[in-house]
Amino acid sequence: MATVSRALRDQPQVNVRTRKRVITVARRLGYIPNRAARSLVVRATQTLGLLIPDATDPIHGEIVTGFEQEAAAHGYTVMLANGFDDTAHERRALEMYAMHRADGIALLGSMLSQRETRLIARASPVVFVNGEHPNLAGYQSDLSQGCIRADDIMGMDAVMRHLFDSGYRRPAYVAGQGSASDLTRRSALAHALKTMSASAPLRVYDSPPRSGEINGPLADMIAKDRPDALICYDDRLAFQLMDLLRERAITAPRDIAVVGFDDIPFARMANPRLTTVAQPAVEIGRQAAAMLLTAIRTGTMPRSIQLPVRLMIRESTINPAAQGDKRPRDQI
């Protein structure tokens, strides 16, 4: 039995010919190693837990892809859970990871506090990816270790400069739901606008309570106020608003410029193509897994990092009639 066990674990003590024979027989018999039993011996499960807030969000899917690629490259399996943007679901998912003894846990866009998360996770190392608890607004309260973010402040500054360079003077922000990234983005936009203009402060439109859809009254308000540019919390919000404004005979970029955030795949294919801030989503996922694997291997969590973003300038902010022949381009 010892020889069989070593052969199935590809141990060098067993010669190549014997290993091949054991593996062939095991496959013929449909044998699958009991990883749970093995974990009791080695005190490791070779699994990582990844909690995401919304499985339907394309940007989250890209982060999952990067995370799973990095985990698989090091022989780890990923347990994926959907938090449904709900703290109760997030707590249950964390308890499930603790029960199954995940070697490490990454939370994407979690609304839980970092302190509560680590209490629930128990002994497992935890990495926070774009943590969304409102107390983290501005990102000054992030832990010095174990946190990964896209640089939202850099992105919002680039957006405002692009709009001003393009002649827009009455921009407005269409907010998210009061998460850390939402509060940080609106603050960064307000600061950028203040440095560029002595005019009125940034106009902010609050989204309706979370329902997945923007409602008509918000579009009516924007149609009445007529800002010349809308900076939306994310790409999905931007597309919903463009559709509602089109029903009110207001189109982008002819009547209003529209900017999103994330650079989901549809942003590059829509008509008009959407100007947006691109997060390095796949790289964020890879870095999160790499950070966890380092913590598991060394017992020390790596320092927190912030990844740069890119402003992707496309048709939704370029009005040929007003701007001349300025073709879409990508801008850092």
Image (tube, rainbow, N blue to C red):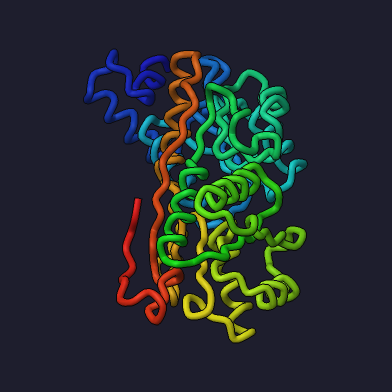
Q: Tell me what residue is drawn at x 53 percent, y 74 percent.
A: 256
Extreme front residue here? 198
Q: Quadrant of residue 167?
A: bottom left
The answer to whether 176 is drawn above or below residue 31 in the figure is below
The answer to whether 169 is drawn above or below residue 95 in the figure is below
Q: Residue 194 in the image: x percent, y percent?
A: 57, 49
Q: Tell me what residue is drawn at x 22 percent, y 23 percent.
A: 16
Q: Residue 109 in the image: x percent, y percent?
A: 61, 42
Relative to residue 95, is residue 310 drawn left or right?
left
Q: Tell me what residue is drawn at x 38 percent, y 21 percent.
A: 4
Q: Residue 308 in the image: x percent, y percent?
A: 41, 41
| Observer able to see residue 266 | no
The answer to whether 318 is drawn above or below residue 94 in the figure is below
Residue 37 or 104: which is nearer the viewer?
104
Relative to residue 8, is residue 14 drawn left or right?
left
Q: Residue 258 in the image: x percent, y percent?
A: 52, 68
The image shows a total of numbered marks equal to 0
Residue 78 or 18: which is nearer the viewer?
78
